[in-house]
Amino acid sequence: MKKRSIFLISSLAFGFSFLYVPILVMIAFSFNEANLSTTWTGLSLKWYQKLFENEQALKALMLSLRIALISATFATILGTLAGLALARFGHFKSRLFLAGMVSAPLVMPEVITGLAMLLFFISIGGLIGWPSGRGVTTITIAHITFSMAYVAVVVQSRLSSLDQSLEEAAMDLGGRPIRIFFDITLPLTAPAMMAGWLLAFTLSLDDLVISSFVSGPGANTLPMYIFSKVKLGISPDINALATLMIGTVACTIGLAGYLSMRHRASRGSGDG
Amino acid sequence: MIQSQPLQKSKDDHDATRPFVEIQGVNKYFDNFCAVNNVNLNVRKGELFSILGGSGSGKTTLLRMLAGLERPDHGRIIIDGQDVTDLPPYERPVNMMFQSYALFPHMTVAQNVGYGLKREGVAKGEISERVEAMLKLVQLQGFGKRKPDHLSGGQCQRVALARSLVKKPKLLLLDEPTGALDKKLREQTQFEIANIQDKLGITFIVVTHDQEEAMNMSGRVAVMNEGQFVQIGTPHEVYENPASKFVADFIGGINLIDGTVAGPVVDGFWPIELPQLGLTVPITHNATLSEGQAVTAAIRPEKLFVATSASTEPSFVSVPGVLYDQGYFGRISLFKVRLPSGRIITSTAQNRVRFARRALDWDENVTVSFDPKSMMVLTQ
């Protein structure tokens, strides 16, 4: 093993502290006994208790989870179909253009996506009368839209690394195209779809900007609730809530990473 | 067979006259690139036929058209009297063994082998029986529950073979069947595939770039270049009587020497003047040549003998030269000899004796001897 220089070690330490010290401070303060977030008086779980008595916060949490579940599921279906088309359609003329279009929402500023969504919902509501107002439905649709791009990218990369002769072999052995999709393509793409679902779930759970644009009266997601509370002054039970959210997100991201890593490992040994 | 009923006999006659696999004027373009150019081929029932060609020769495209994975732009493909040109892969009585084996990684060996039967709607009990029998045939009994990840390359190859044979196809296509195996295993596997083919009597078409694989396994070989067959024949015909310089060079090494026809034919031998050798050599040739015509004389390296003195065989002719380079391959040695004309010719010799006579030295004066009967004339 090569001895690493002090410079590299300190750069790493600095980078990571820059990223994680603020979060660690917040987590620490969620266990603080004091009423103010600025002084440390002792260890306590009282803010967690307070949080679970806060019906507004719990309502927002339930709404966020509901939206995240529905939007992640639809985003996975649509994203998989898009990924499938991009990976399997062969070399049609505008393939590169379409592939770029699918991944563009990944780098699109959220403010623009949110504004565009809002304008779209208003004008289509005026045209066909649906959606009649803004609320849970519009938030869910907006979340599906931006998170499906992530799923498409994940699924497409999995599919293009999949040996196409597997599907050809199944066809050669008497499988009809639909059958092959369920026998071969789907089982081999499932880990990528699962990873995509988890990603979409976290993105939806986290989103504040787009939700704020397309939300209506009464439809407050958890990030929106937290943000509105913070504007009035920081209450330590928000620290507790945020800590719980970080836990959830970290778990899902970890699971997604584990799934795709396990897959890579099994593919690697399969090559040998 | 002779005692059999007249009806049966007439059917046999029909089978004997009608080729089992017919490829009629098949063309395939990819954009503007012509991958397969007006190919015609007849393969007999129960034959092990090889298509030999370099990369980009169109051999794999032809195989994929037989499997139904590509559609020919023109022409028909007929298997056992049935026109399959417009049939999708899953309706053809054809199975294929893929170069990458294409084993389903999420299924066990038994599920892989049984997949074709399952899709055919065969009863479960029969599937497991036939899978077991197939695994026995490829000597993989007891491997049914393993996943492809946990098999060696050679075992994967056998699973792929078993999977493609289990449906008892009329025609089995093999794409570079031993290409991914190491040299020793490759030879052994070639014999095994040929034995299995013999046992089952299924018609095999093998596509390969490996001339040894093609020659070793098959009854007939077609050499393919730029989308066309350049020669079809037994391995012996293709090797000893190549139709063109391309075939001669592609199948094994060969010395190609420019020459001219020096006179009229005498007893079937044409006198060919070979300035590079400083000789005029009488060579047999079936077709008529004209005096003064430019031709190519060709001789295989193993038919040239390099020694410090000329061969004493009365029919042999010899040319002096200088040993320019040599290589030792264990089984054979390779010599490159520079002739007085500057031409370098290649010779190989089997190392038959363990303690050989004094080895030849670089820059040593040597003599190259050969039997003129080993030389052939190529006109294209």
Image (cartoon, rainbow, N blue to C red):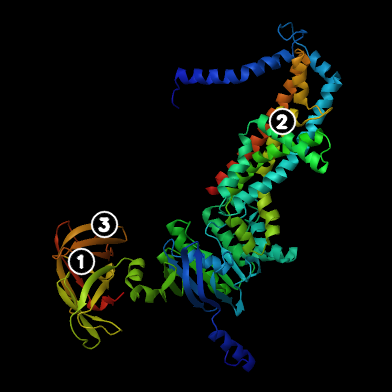
Name the secondary structure under disc 3.
Answer: strand
Q: Name the residue under label 3.
A: B327
Q: What residue type is labelled 3?
A: Gly
Q: Is residue A20 left or right of residue B62?
A: right
How much space separates mark 3 and mark 2, taking CA atoms? 73 Å
Tag 3–tag 2 contact (CB < 8 Å) = no
Q: Where is residue B54 in the image (x, y as percent from the top left)?
A: 41, 63
* Image quadrant occupied by the C terminus of chain B: bottom left
Count of numbered tags? 3
Circle number at residue A5: none
Residue at the spot of label 2 = A210
Q: Share a chain, discs 1 and 3?
A: yes
Q: Mark 3 lies on which chain?
A: B
Instruction: Note whether A200 is above or below B179 in the view shown.
Output: above
**Residue under the image location 76 percent in, 32 percent down:** A214
Look at the image and tell me whether residue B310 can be seen.
no
Of labels 3 and 2, the one closer to you: 2
Which residue is rendered at x = 23% and y = 61% of the image? B335
Instruction: Tell me which residue sits at (68%, 62%) in the image.
Output: A176
Q: Where is residue B235 in the image (x, y as percent from the top left)?
A: 40, 73
Q: Is residue B15 above or below residue A15?
A: below
What amino acid is labelled 2 in the image?
A: Ile
Examine the image and state in which quarter residue B314 appears.
Answer: bottom left
Identify the amino acid type marked 1.
Val
Query: Which sits earlier in the primary sequence, circle 1 or circle 3?
Result: 1
Instruction: Tell me whether the residue at label 1 lies in contact with that at label 3, contact meaning CB atoms closer than 8 angstroms.
Output: no
